[in-house]
Image (cartoon, grey):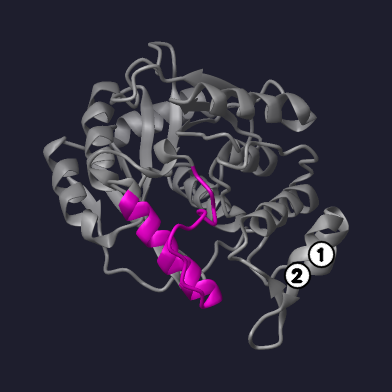
Amino acid sequence: MSSNTPKEEKSRLNARNKNKERYDLSALVMAIPELKNYVRPNKYGVISLDFSNPKGVKLLNKAILHHYYGITAWEFPDENLCPPIPGRADYIHYAADLLAETNVGKIPYGKYITCLDVGMGASCIYPIIGVVDYGWRFIGTDIDVKSIASAQHIINSNEVLKDKVECRLQTNSTRIFEGILHTKDKIDITVCNPPFHASIEEAQKGTRRKIKNLSGKKVKMPALNFSGMSNELVYDGGEHQFIQNMIRESALFSKSCFWFSTLVSKESNLKGIYMSLKNAKTTKFKTIPMGTGNKSSRIVAWTFLSKEEQQIWKNVNWQG
């Protein structure tokens, strides 16, 4: 058993992240002119975006996708989660780095790599980044029919995504991989941004705190500034239970997937995750620190494949 669970360091955006520097707001406003209505000096007099305004945040991310990724059609219902692109992109870049570790340091590009996005959501964000930056193929799952329909509409509306992303509806909300993975599937890596609140009340409390930090305002019943329907943000038992269920199910598909991975937003959940990964008899697991601005997070990844099986996997599946 090998593990890599270092004390967390202050991390920065991945070197390949298109938004590792400050936003070029003038270029982004050119991409989506409506964005200028939400750009104003912050309390330090620096031209910035009002990040406490959900519409402004959504327009910013539309502009980023248009300007940096060539995605011209990115529409989804306002009640769905609007993901911050730089952080989501970082996950994909670190996933690429993880695959490179078994490939003599070279990131494997192209259609021979398949990534499974657990809980893709209406915005289809991880597939967009992975397809545009690395040419990977994606399977995106969700328990919500409307989210699947929204993601499929985005795929159909952008030529670069067509035939690169397959949407699969998870009909059992208590399952993650079961009912989704087929016997013929070979998944190189899974990604997941799990629901991290155990209740609606907890989600609202977190959002009130976030709005106060961003704008200095106290709000009793906030609109979530990154939106998000309840099934995207809330899970019985919260992030801890979701990831425990994921680890348990991953063992059932130990030879169908090279790397399983998930974001872990709460550092306090790590101890229980590591214990479960050891009990599940993984051959290796590791923690990858992430951070955007003042927020720190991390990816936990694990595999059941032996070193010999990893090399066979690479030689058979990664040859274009």
With 286 as the anchor, is 221 left or right in this view?
right
Q: In this view, does 169 lie above or below 130?
A: above
Q: Is residue 16 in sight in this rendering?
A: yes
With 81 as the anchor, is 283 left or right in this view?
left
Quarter assignment of residue 175: top left
Q: Does the magenta stretch include residue 74?
A: no
Give the x, y percent position of residue 101.
Answer: 44, 48
Type of amino acid under label 2: Val
Quarter assignment of residue 248: top left
Residue at position x 64%, y 32% from top? 110
Give the x, y percent position of residue 227.
Answer: 53, 49
Residue nearer the viewer, 146 or 304: 146
Residue for badge 2: 39
Residue at position x 44%, y 35% from top? 189
Residue at position x 61%, y 23% from top? 149
Residue nearer the viewer, 79 or 181: 79
- Quarter that holds the C terminus: top right
Regarding mark 2 in the picture, which secondary structure is present there? strand
Q: Which residues are the magenta region?
A: 201-228
Regarding mark 1 in the picture, which secondary structure is present there? helix
Q: Is residue 289 in sight in this rendering?
A: no
Give the x, y percent position of residue 257.
Answer: 37, 28
Residue for badge 1: 36
